[in-house]
Amino acid sequence: MKFGKNTLDTGDNINLWQYFFLAIYIVFSIFPIYWIFITALKTPSAVLQLPVNWIPENITIENFFYVFQERPYLSYTVNSIIAAVSSTIVCVVLGTPAAYSFSRFKFIGHRFMFISVLVSRMIPPIALIVPFYTMMQRFGLIDTRIALIITYSFFNLPFVIWVMKSYFDEIPTGLDEAARIDGASKWQTFTQVILPITFPGIAASAMLAFIFSWNEFVFTLVLTLTPHAKTLPIGLMDFIADDFIDWARLMAGGLLAALPAIIFGVFFQKYIVGGLTRGAVKE
Amino acid sequence: MLKKLFDKHFHYWIILPSIFLLAFVVVYPTFNLFYTSLFMKNGQLGITRFVGLQNYQKLLFEDSKFWPYLAHTFIYVGSAVTISLILGLIISNILNKAIKFRGALRTMMLLPWMIPLVLTGITWRWIMQDIYGAFNAILMQLGIIDQSIAWLTEANSAMASVITADFWANTPFVTIILLAGLQSIPDQLYEAANVDGANGWQKFWHITLPLLKPSIFVALVMRTLFAIRALDIVYALTGGGPGSSTEVLASYIYNLGRRWLRMGYGSAVGVILLLITIMLVFLFMYILKPESVKE
């Protein structure tokens, strides 16, 4: 038996083997990201030099100019931002009140509708590419940003409802009742009393919905044809289609595509982790 | 008057917009999927003809691609999910201990999950590249191999690369879910076990694992859902090659539906994928019986 152990953990202090394992795993995790950075900062010819340079000698940001000037990355970036921001706003604005309703009221169809939301999170998007393609074709929305904004709500809306419901569930109903006794309408109770205290939840679900939309690949690949609506992840495949893959410039584009992930991951990790665990753990 | 009506049926008013949108983007396409799968619908030939269950008959009994692709899907999903679950268990247990820089470690660990999966595929394609790739360079500088190996042109190593890229990207998710589960286990249980003289392994086996079951269930289900639907990594890393050794059901649906415009047949494969997904979720529920999963 050991004495004087710390209080935080599961009983045992971390041992050398665990440090070793963790270190290897972190290197494994971080190396590809480092490699994206390094490749993007090398000149296209320096990438094709042997032996491989682990630390670049001549750093350049030329590749970023190239993707914006010679390739339609400006359109891709703009499309990515518009589609992801719009879809996030739509889903948070519609999903948050719905989640509040699921959390607070019992009504006819409550259980059925809620199970539908859960089931829709299990449908593999790839299975639905044919229906989505036909549907968007019928509305004449192929290769438009509107098609992307609508389509992204397929996974964002159920997610936002799910996460926000678990945030609302944590707030005692006594708060609602007190507001009602003071004469507030249900709408006022919701917007003025409950919403302000669920800000972390809204932030978390909005960030995750943004990341999901930004990273979306399958639907976007099917629904877009030209730089008019293509987003950054789809744009990356342009390079792969070339006979000779220009890795340095490709990775510069890749870094742009990874930028939101890096920003949110580094600065707002608390919200991301909070939203993620609530989005997954069922109560 | 209007205000009163709004207040009375408030719960419906605030839920209806979402339900309408979901009907449009989830319910309708799902029904349409089943419906289209009963047709021979070819966009290139411009034919639409009702064929009943013939698509399924052809798929299950005549298609020489379906069963190999299904096998690839199971190899891919099975290995990637197993590896990330084991890694996730180990890493989350380590991170749950009193460790310095936990926040920074969590950030570094989470990043691979957050970047676009297609970039994951591309990055690993670059790392595994035969001449200038980092993986060969590392192996050569360590003296493990003396000439570069073309990992992506051989069936087994190509599949291994796809699986590696997948668990690289998705293990963080499993870790985060399991870490949340670990943090909800009360310390007193471990203290009681210490008093009884239990060793670390016994504590893990008799306290941690049983109490972690609901989290393991959730991680397993979500993780499997991610892997089974994943087109991004395969598409970017190998393009299904070499030959068709890394083609999975997801890439088959894409090729059928979008590239060859065989809408009816592609929908039939989509239905099969959907059914497999549902069966797997029920299977996990049956095996793990997580009591906490109610709704």
Image (cartoon, coloured by chain):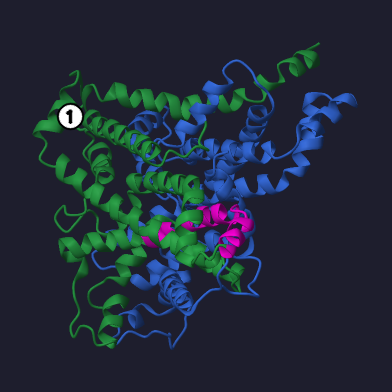
Chain colours: A blue, B green
Picture quarter with the N terminus of chain A: bottom right
Question: Residue drawn 31% across and 57% down?
Answer: B236
Kind of residue indicated by mark 1: Leu
Question: Residue drawn 21% across and 31% down?
Answer: B265
Residue A63 lies, in percent from the top left, at 44, 73
Disc 1: host chain: B
Residue B237 lies, in percent from the top left, at 29, 60
Of residue B197 and residue A238, the one placed in the foreground of this image is B197
Return the residue at label 1.
B45
Disc 1 residue crowd, few under 14, some 14–19, many 20+, Cα 10 Å: few
From the viewer's perspective, is B83 left or right of B206? left
Q: Is residue B169 part of the magenta span, yes or no?
A: yes
The residue most toward the front is B196
In the rendered image, the vertical position of residue B116 relative to residue B60, given as above or below = below
Question: Residue drawn 55% across and 41% down?
Answer: A87
Residue B129 lies, in percent from the top left, at 26, 71
The residue most toward the top is B1
The image quadrant of residue B201 is bottom left
Q: Identify the secondary structure beneath mark 1.
A: loop
Of residue A67 and residue A247, the one placed in the foreground of this image is A247
The image quadrant of residue B69 is top left
From the viewer's perspective, is B198 left or right of B263? right
From the viewer's perspective, is A33 left or right of A82? left
Picture quarter with the C terminus of chain A: top right
Which residues, given as a range, are shown in magenta? B167-195
The image shows a total of numbered marks equal to 1
